[in-house]
Image (cartoon, rainbow, N blue to C red):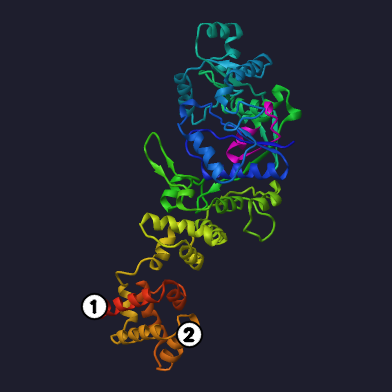
């Protein structure tokens, strides 16, 4: 059975690139009838941020990315938080040492810094590897007897992986094909830290193996570490069950140069996190897609197409359609530029798919916040009429306010352009027509546009837009007669009378 995992670290809010990684894992698992696991990789206790784990869970739940096992729901392969699995990792580190694949290292931070500076002075870069390891303080240079004496004396140490000298290591990647690197280019990574916690490299290999993970789909920033991971599977004797790898391209800045960051979002005014984040340390608040009014379906659809395509021109796809169409081989090797206009386009398209009642629920919240009372049927009617003009729920009040409140001011530029000195005469005629003809669309249209405006050779645009100014306060809105019929005869007449009085005084 296909088993994939999303394994974030609780070091802060979940970046939208991380969300895409989770989404691709989810689509792959569901398409193959497999399992999706949420594992929290909290081996770096120094960077742990309170609240980050719950944020990750809430964000993925909002987006509809569902898990079969995980830190929040349990499962047969638990525990799913690495700090809760701490006791098991030491035995694997010691196994590697016994088998000659790892060694104890006692180098103090100051000694490592001194060595780096020595190399910098020679215009070289220091790397703890097969060429330098015997110059350092470790069980290879000191001998196991001295190493054990130091350990027994309580001296801090780490465990480093021991790469064989000068071998080619090939990573078979589902997106990029075979990627080969020579071991001389690789440093002996720390696998186990002095605080008794494993590093990501050891813990994720052990966890993926013991949780029967079949495919590792993760960001391309982990590609340089993949040769180490392949060698760890070899060192443990797990090559036959090693998962297949797929390293996803980066999400790039809108300009296309460099990884998308929070600073880019701040600079250009868009979120890079799924939910609003309140930093517990600095108190800084970062915006989220949910709080900006994006629909989760729109965010999912947008992210799915940032680095992958279905091989067709289709852009709007439900989660079920994405699951059906998803194919790892169609993921690009190149980074995908973030496009804010496209994000808004997806949001608009999905907002149009909402029912009138669903849009009305958003509108009702705006009315409640302003203490405005209106019947449910009326709110639903307005929502349906104006929905096509809306992208975000926050647009609703600005777009629909005149259905619920008469204007108290009139746009000066619109008035100057449309309201001629004799316009009060034509507005008085509008009131007369509304009072005398049946209050229905065809009758008002004939009496106003045909029998009055056209018959008297008046400028239709000026008269109708002046009427709109009187009713709305500016020259925006739906069909004028439909608007009149919606707000009602008495309310329309009141607004026109007020405009005649107020605008005439100001002209």
Find out whether residue 150 is within the magenta segment. no
**SS category of the residue bearing label 2:** helix
User: In the rendered view, does 363 fall on the left or right side of 4?
Assistant: left
**Quarter of the figure that contains the C terminus:** bottom left
x and y, in percent, of residue 221 in the image: 57, 38
Find out whether residue 213 is within the magenta segment. yes
Q: Quadrant of residue 245?
A: top right
Q: Is residue 472 above or below residue 38?
A: below
The residue at the far left in this view is 505
Q: What residue is shown with label 1?
A: 506
Residue 175 makes an appearance in the image: no
Residue stretch rendered in magenta on the structure:
209-226
Crowding at dot 1, Cα within 10 Å, few <14 / some 14-19 / many 20+, comes out as: few
User: In the rendered view, does 386 fall on the left or right side of 27?
Assistant: left
CB-based contact (under 8 Å), mark 1 and mark 2: no
Q: What residue is shown with label 2?
A: 443
**Quarter of the figure that contains the N terminus:** top right
User: In the rendered view, does 95 fall on the left or right side of 8?
Assistant: right
Crowding at dot 2, Cα within 10 Å, few <14 / some 14-19 / many 20+, comes out as: few
Taking depth in this image into account, of 214 and 202 the one nearest to the observer is: 214
x and y, in percent, of residue 346 in the image: 55, 58
Taking depth in this image into account, of 477 and 59 the one nearest to the observer is: 477
Q: What's the CA distance linking mark 1 and mark 2?
A: 33 Å
The residue at the far right in this view is 240
User: In the rendered view, does 124 fall on the left or right side of 413?
Assistant: right
Looking at marks 1 and 2 on the same chain, the residue that comes earlier in the sequence is marked by: 2
| Of the two numbered discs 1 and 2 in the rendering, the one whose residue sits closer to the viewer | 2
Q: Which residue is located at x 45 percent, y 83 percent?
A: 438
Q: Is residue 233 above or below residue 330?
A: above
């Amino acid at each position: 059975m296909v088993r994939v995992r999303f394994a974030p670290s609780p070091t802060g809010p979940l970046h939208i690139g991380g969300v895409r990684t989770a989404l691709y894992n989810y689509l792959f698992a569901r398409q193959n009838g497999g399992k999706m696991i949420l594992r929290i990789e909290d081996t770096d206790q120094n960077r742990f941020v309170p609240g980050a784990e719950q944020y990750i869970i809430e964000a993925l739940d909002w987006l509809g990315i569902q898990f079969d096992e995980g830190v929040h729901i349990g499962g047969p392969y638990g525990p799913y938080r690495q700090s809760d699995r701490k006791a098991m990792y030491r035995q694997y580190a010691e196994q590697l040492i016994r088998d000659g694949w790892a060694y104890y290292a006692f180098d103090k931070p100051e000694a490592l810094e001194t060595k780096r500076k020595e190399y910098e002075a020679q215009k070289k870069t220091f790397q703890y590897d097969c060429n330098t390891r015997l110059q350092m303080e470790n069980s290879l240079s000191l001998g196991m007897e001295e190493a054990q004496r130091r350990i027994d004396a309580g001296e801090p140490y780490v465990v480093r992986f021991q790469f064989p000298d000068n071998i080619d290591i090939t990573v078979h990647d589902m997106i990029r094909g075979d990627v080969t690197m020579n071991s001389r280019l690789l440093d002996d990574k720390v696998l186990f830290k002095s605080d008794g916690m494993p590093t990501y490299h050891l813990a994720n290999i052990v966890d993926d193996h013991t949780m029967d993970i079949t495919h590792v789909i993760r960001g391309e920033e982990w590609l340089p570490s993949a040769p180490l991971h392949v060698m760890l599977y070899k060192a443990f004797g797990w090559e036959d069950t090693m998962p297949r790898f797929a390293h996803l391209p980066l999400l790039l800045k809108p300009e296309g140069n460099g990884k998308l960051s929070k600073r880019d979002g701040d600079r250009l005014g868009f979120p890079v996190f799924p939910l609003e984040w309140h930093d517990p340390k600095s108190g800084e608040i970062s915006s989220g897609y949910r709080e900006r009014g994006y629909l989760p379906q729109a965010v999912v659809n947008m992210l799915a197409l940032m680095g992958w395509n279905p091989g067709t021109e289709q852009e709007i796809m439900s989660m079920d359609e994405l699951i059906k169409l998803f194919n790892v081989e169609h993921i690009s090797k190149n980074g995908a530029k973030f496009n804010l206009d496209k994000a808004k386009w997806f949001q608009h398209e999905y907002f149009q798919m909402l029912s009138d009642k669903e849009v009305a629920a958003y509108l009702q919240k705006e009315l409640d916040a302003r203490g405005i009372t209106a019947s449910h049927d009326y709110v639903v009617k307005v929502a349906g009429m104006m929905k096509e003009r809306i992208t975000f729920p926050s647009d609703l009040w600005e777009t629909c306010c005149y259905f619920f409140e008469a204007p108290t001011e009139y746009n000066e530029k619109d008035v100057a352009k449309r309201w001629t000195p004799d316009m009060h005469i034509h507005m008085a005629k509008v009131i007369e027509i509304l009072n005398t003809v049946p209050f229905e669309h065809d009758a008002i249209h004939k009496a106003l546009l045909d029998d009055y405006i056209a018959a008297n050779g008046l400028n239709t645009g000026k008269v109708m837009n002046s009427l709109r100014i009187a009713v709305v306060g500016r020259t925006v809105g739906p069909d004028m007669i439909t608007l009149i019929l919606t707000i009602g005869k008495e309310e329309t007449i009141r607004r026109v009378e007020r405009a005649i009085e107020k605008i005439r005084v100001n002209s």
